[in-house]
Amino acid sequence: MSAEVINRFADRVDNYIKYRPHYPQELFDFLLAQHIISKDSVIADIGSGTGISSEPFLKMNLTVYGIEPNKEMREAAENLLVGYKNFKSIDATAEHTTLENNSVDLIVAGQAFHWFDREKTKQEFKRILKPNGTVLLMWNDRRTDSTPAGRQGGDFLKSYEDFLQLCGNDYKTVNHKNVQDKKIFDDFFGENNYHEKWFYSYQDVDLTGLTGRVLSSSYMPNKGHVNYEHMMYCLKKLFARYQQNNQVRLDYDTKIYYGSLNN
C-alpha cells in the first residue's frame, strides 16, 4: 500500500467518525447464526480505520486486532474504543499485518479492500488465518437509482450520484464499486469458494449530516480546495430541492462476500 493511499484520509477523520454509515445489526446476527463467528472468535479487522467495523465485534466481547496504517485514523479508533480491553490496535498494512501464523478465526475487510495489493494481501491472509477460518469482505454500498417503495427519494439518489461525479476529484477512479466484480472475487477466493449476501440499511441526514458524509470521502474537495465553494453551492441546492422535513435519505445495500482461502 502506497504512502499516498495510507495518508489519503488523514484530513477526513472527524467527518468519517461522525457521518459514515455503520453496519446493520442483521449482518452480525447472520454471522452468529451461520457459525462464522462464535463467543471465542479472534477477529483481524484489516484497514480498520476509525473503528466503525471493529466496534460491533467488540460489543460481543470478541478479540479484535485493528490493522490500520494511517496514524490519524488509527489514533481516532484507539480513542473511540478505549473502553474495550479486547481491542488491539496495530500500525500495519493488509500486505504485512505483523500477526502470528494461524492466529485469527475471521478476517474482516471493509471499504479499504479496494486499496490493497490483492495478491500480496491474499498470501498474508492465508498466513494469519486459522484452518477453516473465514475471510469477510463487506461494503455499505450506496444505492444510486432506486429507493424502497413508498418513498420519493429515487430522484434524489440519482441526482446525488450525478453531484458526486460532477464535483469529485477522482470519484470514478477510486469508487469502491470498481472492485465489486465477480472476476475479482473468483480470483481472490477461488471460483465457487465464496458466498454473497445483502442487507438493507439507510441514513436520514440533515444538511450538516449530508455535508459531513460528502467530506468524509477522499475523492471530494475538502476545505481549502479550489473547487470546495462550488461543490458546497451545488450540495446546498441539491439538498434544498429534495429535502423532506429537513432531511434526505441515503439508502444502502450492505454487501458481504465471505469464504475460505483454501485454493
Image: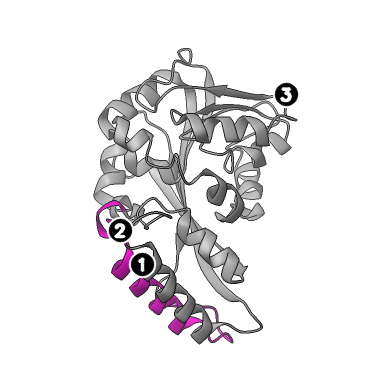
Q: Which residue is mark 1?
A: 164
120 relative position to 146: left or right: left
Q: Nearer the viewer, mark 1 or mark 3?
A: 1
| Structural crowding at the residue carrying mark 3, measured as other residues with C-alpha within 10 Å and reported as few (<14), some (14–19) or many (≥20) | few
| Structural crowding at the residue carrying mark 2, measured as other residues with C-alpha within 10 Å and reported as few (<14), some (14–19) or many (≥20) | some
198 relative position to 63: left or right: left
* Amino acid at the residue labelled 1: Leu
Magenta span contains residue 75? no
Q: Nearer the viewer, mark 2 or mark 3?
A: 2
Q: Position of residue 84 (x, y in %)?
A: 72, 29
In which quarter of the view is residue 167 placed? bottom left
Residue drawn at (52%, 69%) of the image: 251
Cα distance between the residues tagged 2 and 1: 7 Å
In which quarter of the view is residue 246 placed? bottom right
Dominant secondary structure (helix, strand or loop) of the stretch shown in magenta: helix
Residue drawn at (59%, 64%) of the image: 209
Q: Answer whether labels 2 and 1 touch (C-beta < 8 Å).
A: yes
Magenta span contains residue 167? yes
Where disc 2 sits, the SS reads helix
Q: Which residues are magenta?
A: 145-174
Dot placed on the residue nearer the N-terminal end, 2 or 1: 1
Where disc 3 sits, the SS reads loop
What label sits on residue 171 in the rendered view?
Answer: 2
Q: Can residue 262 be seen here?
A: yes
* Amino acid at the residue labelled 2: Tyr
Q: Position of residue 8 (x, y in %)?
A: 37, 41
From the viewer's side, name the closer residue of 81 and 236: 236
From the viewer's side, name the closer residue of 38 and 154: 154
